Image (spheres, rainbow, N blue to C red):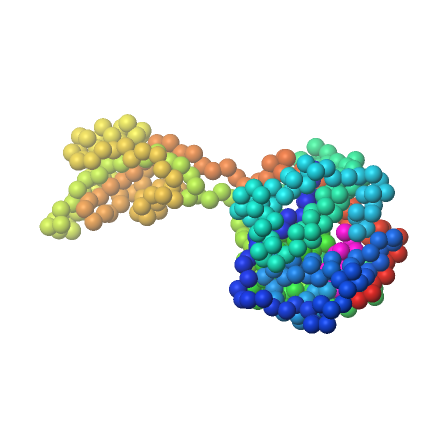
Amino acid sequence: MPRRLAPLLIAAFVMLMAGPTVLWPPHAHAQPMQQIAAVVNDDIVTMRDLRNRIEMVIVTSRLPRTSDTARRLAPQVLRTLIDEQLQIQEAERLNVSVSDAEMERARSDLEARNGLRPGQFDGFIAQLGIDPSTVERQMLANLLWSKLVQRRFSNQAVVSAEEVEETRARLAENVGKEQKRVSEILLTVDDPAQEGEVAQLADRLVNQLRSGASFQSIARQFSQAANANVGGDIGWVLADQLAPELAEAVDRLAPGAVSDPIRTIVGYHIIQVSDTRILAKPNPADAEIRLSQVFLPVRPSDNSEQRATQVAAVRDIAAQAVTCDDLALLAKEAGSPVATDLGTSRVGELPEALRTAAAGLGVGEKSAPINLPNGVMAIMVCERSDPEANLPSAEQIRAQLENQRFEVLAQRYLRDLRQAAFVETRV
């Protein structure tokens, strides 16, 4: 099953900072909780469903726990519940179901991701004031939708070996260019009448994100992209892999920053950059090297001429050595008081003086003399193992391309279900 179509997983929960806060006006509690919030074909979404989901969104996304927040979230949360009902109805129509074992695996995954022991999840979410039934509904809808999309489009999402190789070759051509780790929240606009409502929601989410709300949690609850289940993570991308409007925003964003809403043909995108790196350029600090040294001491009482003599002697020994064995023999003959073999280390773990000298040396190459407080040394690289380049593997490329195709197809599928459905909202 494509990773980006796996069941929606709730982000790490946060304990409430204050005492109970009323999220709904007092009169709302007096109304029958089975009051209808929306009619979806032959089914309904109740006010209880809506209220419980809003409370879950607020807690998991670290949004302000106020009645104003609940009011502002209500339209989009209701839309999400309507979409889930359409997905459940489509699964029933096509006789697609989820087994108890699949639900239990999803629950176990949720427990593991939240650092809980098996069986603790219900008690934990109840402690946070979240109705377990709203979590179960979300899990069920997303498991069913994942199965539906997989079964319907598995043949259309096949990626050929040629496509994988073309993508890898294109990445290889961009070696040395900057990549950014990008996440997105997508709010689609299927009906022009929704334009204002969706734009307002996008603005509100940006404000909350810039005030400290969790991007991953907001993406899981609001994004309509198929990567919502992984917190909106797109992965490492080059600018030219994105739509021009998104690429322009990504270019301007520093790590941790959140973009303004970006309008594209499908709706509004909110982008965050979490990190940057140079494509296929490994970190030199991760190289492992085995070093040999020659060291000649300098006493604290020695003057500059005596130190210069030792520098010259070290330079001469290093110049004569062709191999690490040569360096060891010459160092012993010169009376070096320390062992020549420094062993194998990561470059990044070496003392600063050695790290600077060794970083650019190949096997058999030697450094210039290095002045130390107690003497002079030179080093030779006996063995070197450089880290692999960070180009993705063929399997990683294939999975990414498949996920992209499934995402487009899933969005079209849900859009068609919306257009064919009878939906009446009553709040």
Residue 101: image quadrant is top right
Q: Which residues are magenta?
A: 75-84
Snapshot quadrant of residue 71: bottom right
Drawn side of residue 96 relative to residue 211, left or right = right
- Which residue is rendered at x = 49% and y = 42% of the image? 282
Nearer-the-camera pick, 71 or 216: 71
Relative depth, front residue between 13 and 245? 13
In the picture, measured across the screen, residue 331 lies left or right of residue 284, that is: left
At 57% from the left and 52% from the top, the residue drawn is 124
Q: Position of residue 314 (x, y in %)?
A: 22, 39
In which quadrant of the rendered view does residue 330 lie?
A: top left
Query: Going 33% across and 43% down the picture, which residue do you hit?
Result: 350
Q: Position of residue 207 (x, y in %)?
A: 62, 68
The residue closer to the viewer here, 383 or 117, is: 117
Which residue is farthest left? Answer: 301
Q: In which quadrant is the C terminus drawn? A: bottom right
Quadrant position of the N terminus in the picture? top right
Residue 271 in percent (x, y) is at 64, 58
Residue at image location 64% in from the left, 65% down from the top: 206
The answer to whether residue 214 is seen in the rendering is yes
Q: Is residue 105 left or right of residue 290?
A: right
Q: Magenta span has 280? A: no
Q: How many marks?
A: 0
**Residue 308 location, x and y as percent?**
18, 47
Q: Main secondary structure of the magenta part?
A: helix
Q: Nearer the viewer, residue 75 or 65?
A: 65
Is residue 49 found left or right of 275 in the rendered image? right
